Image (cartoon, rainbow, N blue to C red):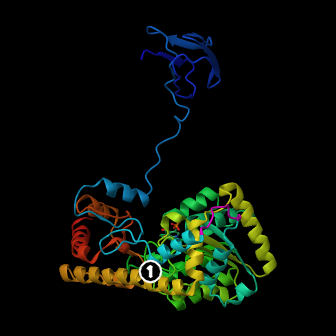
Amino acid sequence: MASTMLSLASASPCASLSMPENHKGKMKVGSFEFSTVLGKERRNPFLKAKSSGRITMAVAVNVSRFEGITMAPPDPILGVSEAFRKDANEMKLNLGVGAYRTEELQPYVLNVVKKAENLMLERGENKEYLPIEGLAAFNKVTAELLFGADNPLIQQQRVATVQGLSGTGSLRLAAALIERYFPGAKVLISSPTWGNHKNIFNDAGVPWSEYRYYDPKTVGLDFDGMILDIKAAPEGSFILLHGCAHNPTGIDPTPEQWEKIADVIQQKNHIPFFDVAYQGFASGSLDADASSVRSFAARGLELLVAQSYSKNLGLYAERIGAINVVCSSSDAATRVKSQLKRLARPMYSNPPIHGAKIVANVVGDPSLFNEWKEEMQLMAGRIKSVRQILFDSLSAKDKSGKDWSFILKQIGMFSFTGLNKAQSDNMTNKWHVYMTKDGRISLAGLSAAKCEYLADSIIDSYHNVK
Ligand SMILES: Cc1ncc(COP(=O)(O)O)c(C=O)c1O
């Protein structure tokens, strides 16, 4: 199709536009306006036109208004799955994203989730909007699951619970609350931490800095460094803590260490902010995995807890979680909740219903709840068993005398291998093992059958790449 190319004399940022043939009317390109009338055009004198044969009304301007927008880098975690999908090698292994797989390396929908969904269908439930704070039945059970149903906090109505868009959305809502009501307050995050934490606080405009957490020499917790950094933070800082199964390291403080962390936080008048994305996945027990949060709350501390059901109920795509703010009075909790709702309304208006109903049905029904606990133990058990097999393979194959026992000490979905970026690149480029560049592997994506292959790839990368 013949077309007329118009270019702006003063190449201002402008749109690349085309118009249908025989278009009639006025058109605006940047600050320039011109009219088109049945094959002829009346041009703004600032516009130069090149004609090639019959004028067809197709107008294109070769500089986009979005010219200034550069290409964003792929997400360091979700980008790994994209690269994995493109790899045709049959030995490929995706240990990037923290999503549970069966022994056949297939995604898993929990039986209790299917049962809860069937219940919803049988009841013919509707899809009306939820209130801004989410489903009341969900908010009730999620706080009970976290703090324990008989926790006095709940009877005293001192917890402001708002359903969030999974763990990420709940953290983001809390970040918005901090930005609005604690201007200038700093959030301290562990070094290293889950990749999205920094994005969340950056986007919310909340300043953050890091506290020491991982000690590469021991591939363990740098407890002294952590305590010193929390002590040194400005009084009244928010201290972001992974409630259990620290991501990416798989290293959690012991109960005694948690008490010392709480002591320092209390002395410095800081506010603990727990991220609980793996309740039940660390030990297989929902109660044991909530013990850090419960022990802090038992001290009477005010605190924040973001929850996610992505991993423990396998509801990744349903985006179901909550933000809980424990306050010193029910009056404060009511006010905090009202402000969380106010922040949520212009962001996403109200949360989705499907996942909330599933959680409410599973946690609120004693028989489904017990079934869930059994299924969770199976999932956590499978991860523990591949952890053991991987350790056994590494120890048997590696004759260098290196101690791989840190793999057994770590808990949860992940193992932090201690491999550096070049070594992690070798894992992917040579062995087709996809993982994040910080050396983290998700054991939830590993099968017993693949442990030997993985051990070979780790030994090669560790000893032959520096
Ligand atoms: C530490 C941590 N927090 C929060 C999340 C949030 O997950 P989601 O938004 O899927 O619930 C994750 C997910 O990987 C995580 O590892």
Tell me how many marks there are: 1
Q: Position of residue 421 (x, y in %)?
A: 34, 62
Q: Check the image and name the residue furthest to the right.
A: 331
Q: Residue at x 64, y 71 (%)?
A: 323
- According to the picture, the residue beneath numbered tag 1 turns out to be 251
> Principal SS element in the magenta part?
loop
Q: Which amino acid, by three-letter code, is at mark 1?
A: Ile
Is residue 155 magenta-colored? no
Residue 410 in view here: no
Quarter where residue 214 is shown? bottom left
Q: Residue at x 35, y 64 (%)?
A: 435
Question: Judging from the image, what secondary structure is the residue with disc 1 in?
Answer: loop
| Left or right of 182 in this view: 262 | left
The quarter of the rendered structure image containing the N terminus is top left
Q: Position of residue 81 (x, y in %)?
A: 37, 59
| Left or right of 15 in this view: 451 | left
The quarter of the rendered structure image containing the C terminus is bottom left
Q: Nearer the viewer, residue 312 or 452?
A: 312
Quarter where residue 411 is shown? bottom left
| Left or right of 461 in this view: 350 | right
Instruction: Give above or below for 164 relative to 294.
Output: above
Q: Nearer the viewer, residue 433 or 40?
A: 40
Is residue 129 magenta-colored? yes
Q: Position of residue 199 (x, y in %)?
A: 55, 59
Quarter where residue 37 is shown? top right
Q: Position of residue 440 (x, y in %)?
A: 38, 69
Instruction: Give above or below for 366 relative to 327.
Output: below
Q: Residues within 10 Å of mark 1 (few under 14, many from 20)?
A: many
Residue 350 in view here: yes
Q: Which stretch is magenta?
A: 124-132
Q: Nearer the viewer, residue 45 or 363?
A: 363
